[in-house]
């Protein structure tokens, strides 16, 4: 009888883990990426966008400097 109770408990736990797995897939996406790497990519994209906004201020006055900043933003965004 105790084996039956243990198996029901394990079965219940497995169903809960399956539900948790489904929730995680919906929350993080089903592509299997790690949340840490996604946050790092978002941070890099945000930093690159801020640098592009800063570079835009120099397009007229110093186009070469602006071009260097745009290139740096692209390099930063590509590095993971």
Image (cartoon, helix red, strand yellow):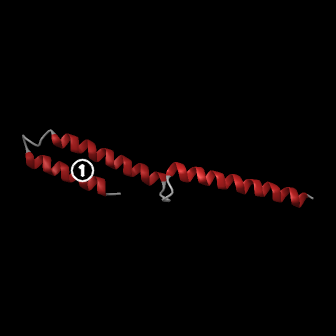
**Total numbered circles:** 1
Taking the spot 63% from the left edge, 51% from the top edge, the residue there is 20
Taking the spot 18% from the left edge, 48% from the top edge, the residue there is 69
Left or right relative to 12: residue 28: left
Residue carrying label 1? 73
Taking the spot 43% from the left edge, 54% from the top edge, the residue there is 37
Question: Residue placed farthest to the right in the image?
Answer: 1
Disc 1 crowd, CA 10 A, few/some/many (<14, 14-19, 20+): many
Q: Position of residue 15 (x, y in %)?
A: 71, 55
Q: Position of residue 75 (x, y in %)?
A: 25, 56
Residue 56 occupies which quadrant of the picture?
top left
Work out whether residue 80 or residue 24 is closer to the camera in this orientation and state it: 24
Q: Position of residue 17 (x, y in %)?
A: 67, 54
- The image shows residue 48, relative to residue 14, as above or below, that is above
Left or right relative to 14: residue 74: left
Taking the spot 35% from the left edge, 57% from the top edge, the residue there is 80
Question: Residue placed farthest to the top in the image?
Answer: 57
Residue 74 occupies which quadrant of the picture?
bottom left
SS at circle 1:
helix
Query: The N terminus appears in which quarter of the rendering?
Result: bottom right
Left or right relative to 10: residue 34: left
């Amino acid at each position: 009888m105790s084996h039956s109770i243990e198996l029901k408990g394990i079965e219940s736990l497995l169903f809960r883990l399956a539900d948790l797995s489904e929730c995680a897939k919906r929350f993080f996406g089903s592509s299997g990426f790690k949340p840490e790497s996604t946050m790092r990519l978002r941070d890099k994209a945000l930093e690159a966008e801020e640098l592009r906004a800063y570079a835009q201020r120099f397009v007229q006055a110093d186009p070469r400097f602006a071009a260097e900043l745009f290139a740096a933003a692209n390099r930063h965004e590509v590095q993971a």
